[in-house]
Amino acid sequence: MASYDIAAIEQKWQERWEKERTFYASEAADAPKFYNLQMYPYPSGELHVGHLRNYTYVDVLTRYKKMRGFNVMSPMGWDSFGLPAENAAIETGIHPLTFTEEHIVKMTEQVRRLGAVYDWDRELAAHRPDYYRWTQWLFLQLFANDLAYKKEAAVNWCPDDQTVLANEQVVEGSCERCGATVEKRNLSQWFFAITHYGQRLLDDLATLDDWPERVRVMQENWIGRSEGASFRLPIAGHDDKSIDVYTTRPDTMFGMTFVVLAPEHPLVAELVAGTEYEAPVAEFVEQVSHETEVERMAAEGDKKGMSIGVNAINPATGDEVPIFIADYVLLSYGTGAIMAVPGQDQRDWDFAKAHDLRIVRTVQPPDDWDGEAYVGEGPAINSGFLDGLEVDDAKAKTIEWLEEQGIGEAAIQFRLRDWLISRQRYWGAPIPVIHCPDCGIVPVPEDQLPVLLPEIDDYKPEGSSPLAAAEDFINTTCPSCGTAARRDPDTMDTFVDSSWYYLRYVDASNDEAPFARDKADYWMSVDQYVGGVEHAVLHLLYSRFITKVLYDLGYVGVEEPFRALFTQGMIVKDGAKMSKSKGNVVSPDGYYEQYGADAMRLYELFIGPPTDDAVWNDRGVEGTSRFLDRVWRLGDGEVGTVSDRDETPADVEMLRLAHRTVEKVTGDIERFAFNTAVAALMEFSNGLGAYLRSEAGGRRATFDTVYDMLLRMLAPLAPHLAHELWERIGNDSMLATEPWPEWDPELTKLERVTMVVQVDGKVRDRIDVDASITEADAVALALTSARVQEYTKGNEPAKVVARPPKIVNVVTA
């Protein structure tokens, strides 16, 4: 049992922080700003202990930065549009709005119970009209600047959720949300032209020094910039047609012995129309349509394909080469056509062997090469005017030749594709355009926003948006000519909602604009963003794109939304990430009741390095609870004795330990090493307890000083207990507004340390030495150690590696 009334103390201080608006932010504050933000959560209803890890980290940083003198803004909101609420409505009959609002209430209670503090004046929710009005406004800005467009396209279709998916939402051929195998369909869809920003998105990754390197690499790979050449291949017998090809290896053109088109390539149907190949090609195209992109692009496995009975002309050699269609070429990548050079590409080699096609090497492999396709460096061979040139020179020479011939040019391509944002679902922000038979696509005037999501009876999608059947919603008049017209039936993907919410927080109550420019200039960029690495491509890339668009349009003064990024690990139980679908979630409610929020917070911090996944231990909270109880009893006078005696060396050593702990904990919090910060505080409290229980007891002035430092360090980590003890020891001020403790560098210096001595990597002695010992003295002490000499047998060591004052390693051979 705890020595104090946990529930009463938690309620008291949570009410105090809210009543006194301790953590509400203002642009007028006379302090440097710190915008501290977590990725806003989906209101799933029940938080588990895995969720709380993220909230605890952000709350610790909010409280710590406030004590360091910053004007901290830490807002909260809800990613509340999306499939889960709509699917629940389909299954249960509960309206998505009711489902969502009830879950927001429940999650808010659980977050508040943790003691997490937010500026609740800035709370937002993506499903509320006062937010999605401005999501629709954002769409209109992109539309007005030719960055939003609608086109017919082959798209990813989830047969279970009955909606399209962006490429990023397809994981190994399956829907990331429900796991269903994704199909391809041709549909007319809305896109944002993120590819226009491909180079800037790539270049500006270099400015994000405070992002994890692996996240930057993931984004770089997804953007996928490559340099090469684009050129046109003539088609034999079809003077009015040509095939556009992009390649990163134009120098291998002389080895092109066939051409491969994606089965969906629009030229395919034209070239086989009325020929004997028309029916078998159509059958092949139908067969391939059921394969996922992952299956089609996999390196292993047979590459299916067939000739279409038409030849292209290799412009380098003048030879006619056959045109094939094959499953391993995708219309969504590059131009949907490749020049096949089997001598320099293994997939082309395998295909050529399967179809008995010519293979011509264009790069000389090493003499001992006994493989198949050769993809390394070497001089050009069998390549006419390129023979003898190394790869880079041969590339440049080929591009120069293509330009001279007027059939090609240097080109840069990106793997990145435009962002598909329309969804055939109900629960989302309606796309604010009107389709007029006379005027075409007409944007809804801004003064008519929001286009409200209507009430409907049937949310179940049947291959098209449920809104299409809502006649009162769909039927309208054209704002340009007054003709009867129809609204767009699709809604926006929830990634649009989350691509700009951090900007709405800076001015969340503004009814005239999404945010005021002066407030955005004050708060942006976000100083610290915290969330899961699973959003490294999707959400972060889209947010960076939207920020750059708004920068170009003059709405914000920054090009990157998040200055620093931290991606936390997950909580694991029973060998899997904690989730409802795995049935391994652990609710925090029971721990709140038995041990309190502070013990829960400390265990979330202590469970392991924050960047790593951590295994949940049901008894872990018990340990942090015992630590907090010791801190309480230290302040309550239940441990040892304290008197007004004179200062002794023990008091000085206690002060040294306190200052070393402040230095350690400060550094740990700054670099998100929360687990070692908690460990240092536990060690400090143990040292303080031993000090009080010593024969002389504690000195009052020393104890008051170091206990004050302990409570200040605990304030961000275990705030309820720390605030209560701060008040109980006679302070009138609010601990949250007190300054963070400082350390004296002179007091943090260790006077004596234990130096480890190894012989051939094994510990053979430990020697108490002065912390300032020189390398020469450390080596001399190690070599004269009797225990070390037992293993060196009086022989001169082969080598001695010294890192004083910590370690000396003697190598004998």
Image (spheres, rainbow, N blue to C red):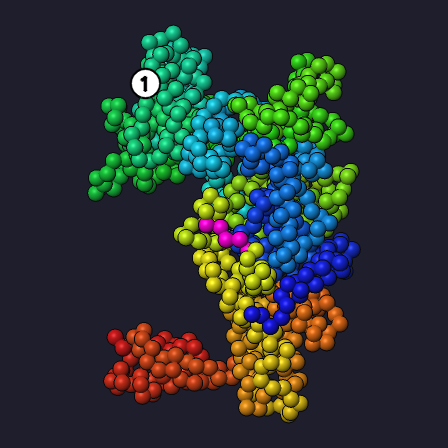
Residue 631 lies in the magenta-colored region:
no
Can you give x and y, in whole percent of width and height, for residue 309 in the image?
33, 14
Q: Which residues are magenta?
A: 584-588
Taking the image as shown, residue 555 lies to the left or right of residue 227, namely right
Can you give x and y, in whole percent of width and height, for residue 752 in the image?
48, 84
Query: Where does label 1 land, which residue?
Result: 307
Residue 586 lies in the magenta-colored region:
yes
Q: In percent of the image, x 60 and y 86: which residue is there?
A: 641
Q: In percent of the image, x 61 and y 42: which residue is there?
A: 79
Question: As shown in the figure, which amino acid type bears the numbered disc 1?
Answer: Ser
Quadrant location, the C terminus: bottom left
Image height check: is 369 above or below 699? above
Q: Quadrant of residue 431?
A: top right
Instruction: Pick whichever, 269 or 384, lies toward us.
Output: 269
Q: In percent of the image, x 58 and y 37: which residue is there?
A: 85
Instruction: Pick whichever, 243 or 649, lies toward us.
Output: 649
Q: In percent of the image, x 52 and y 74: which residue is there?
A: 683
Work out whether residue 434 can be spotted. no
Image height check: is 497 above or below 681? above
Work out whether residue 21 can be spotted. yes
Q: Quadrant of residue 138?
A: top right
Taking the image as shown, residue 503 lies to the left or right of residue 754, namely right
